Image (tube, rainbow, N blue to C red):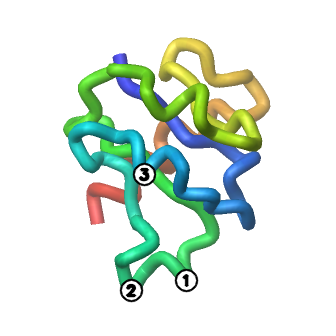
Amino acid sequence: MTYVIAEPCIGTKDASCVDVCPVDCIHPGPDSPEYETSEMLYIDPVECIDCGACEPVCPVTAIFPDFDVPEEWSKYTEINADYFAQ
């Protein structure tokens, strides 16, 4: 299992999730040059250790376990993975 960031993050990029991630798998972080131009944050499905620390700190409820992403946002599972395939 991995976690996925979905549509509610677009335009928000609160980054609370970045601060609590123990393995630094959420990008781009606020210190990254890409942060300002990215429309949302992404979770690396390979690096994610499924700890769940990010989910409760998200102020817009944009983070879900991959098996629990709402149907209307299911495409974000692939969007997150594609971000890291670049």
Describe the element under mark 3 as helix, strand or loop. Answer: helix
What is the three-letter code of the residue carrying label 2? Pro
Describe the element under mark 2 as helix, strand or loop. Answer: loop
Q: Is residue 23 above or below residue 67?
A: below
Which residue is more in the foreground, 35 or 18? Answer: 18
Q: How many marks?
A: 3
Number of other residues with Cα within 10 Å of mark 2, as a class: few under 14, some 14 to 19, many 20 or more: few
Residue beneath label 2, please?
Answer: 33
Point out residue 55 in the picture as x, y percentages from the top left corner. Answer: 55, 28
Q: Is residue 79 above or below residue 66?
A: below
Q: Residue at x 56, y 41 (%)?
A: 5
Residue beneath label 1, please?
Answer: 36
Discs 2/3, front: 3
In which quarter of the view is residue 6 placed? Answer: top right
What is the three-letter code of the residue carrying label 3? Val
Residue beneath label 3, please?
Answer: 18
Point out residue 84 in the picture as x, y percentages from the top left corner. Answer: 30, 56
Could you give the CA–CA distance between mark 1 and mark 3, rounded to whole angstroms? 15 Å
Discs 1/3, front: 3
Asked if labels 2 and 1 touch by Cβ distance under 8 angstroms, the answer is yes
Which numbered disc, 1 or 3, marks the residue that appears first in the sequence?
A: 3
Which residue is more in the foreground, 22 or 48? Answer: 22
Could you give the CA–CA distance between mark 2 and mark 3, rounded to whole angstroms? 15 Å
What is the three-letter code of the residue carrying label 1? Glu
Location of the N terminus by quadrant is: top left
Which numbered disc, 2 or 3, marks the residue that appears first in the sequence?
A: 3
Q: Is residue 20 left or right of residue 44?
A: right
In which quarter of the view is residue 2 placed? Answer: top left
